[in-house]
Image (cartoon, rainbow, N blue to C red):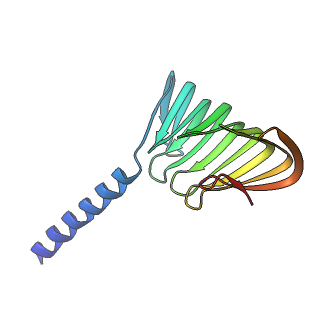
Amino acid sequence: MRKKVILLTILLLVTLTATALAAKLSFKADRQYFDFSTGLHVLSGNVQIEIGTRTITAGEARVNLATMEVWASGGVTVIQNDLFFTGDTVYVYAKDSAEISGGVVLTRSDLKISADSVDYNWRTKTAVFRGNVQVSQNGIVWSAATVTYNVKTNTIL
């Protein structure tokens, strides 16, 4: 029985370590503290959060390391490779999605999309822009209520 408990404990530790290393989340800010009542790290001033290959900058943020969630506001940027999103606020669930709102702008080498909000799915690589969407691509500018953009194929769907 004791061997089974030890084996199970080792297996659990290995699994949790592999999960934690799969998408490492780190952060820095001018001021930070841990709020024991909410279980969140509270950051303010020159916030920089890194989740794998993604970088989020903001004026302030709250981070839950257990669930890999980030809530940020104040001059938000979300950067991954050649993608550059800006907005007023962002909610990021590190493994799946980012929801950016308030004057959202996506810039890429030949593309600029602005909107009231965007939902970006990390897994499917699609961004759904909503509200006052304006697209500028290869010198052509047009507007729509909603636009879906595939980041991987660089196409508007």
Disc tally is: 0
Q: Quadrant of residue 101?
A: top right
Quadrant of the drawing holding the C terminus = bottom right
Towards the viewer: 156 or 80? 156
Q: Is residue 156 visible?
A: yes
Please give the name of the residue rendered at 65% of the width and 52% of the height, measured from the top-left corner: 154
Please give the name of the residue rendered at 55% of the width and 28% of the height, measured from the top-left corner: 47
In this rendering, the answer to whether 2 lies above or below 52 is: below
Please give the name of the residue rendered at 54% of the width and 34% of the height, measured from the top-left corner: 42
> Residue furthest toward the front?
138
In this rendering, the answer to whether 65 lies above or below 109 is: below
Towards the viewer: 78 or 43? 78
Q: Quadrant of residue 19?
A: bottom left
> Residue furthest toward the left?
3
72 horizontally vs 140: left or right = left
Q: Is residue 35 visible?
A: no
List x then y, in percent, for residue 129: 77, 51
Please give the name of the residue rendered at 86% of the width and 41% of the height, measured from the top-left corner: 141
Quadrant of the drawing holding the N terminus = bottom left
List x then y, in percent, for residue 74: 68, 30
List x then y, in percent, for residue 104: 75, 39
Towards the viewer: 140 or 120? 140
122 horizontally vs 146: left or right = left
List x then y, in percent, for residue 67: 49, 54
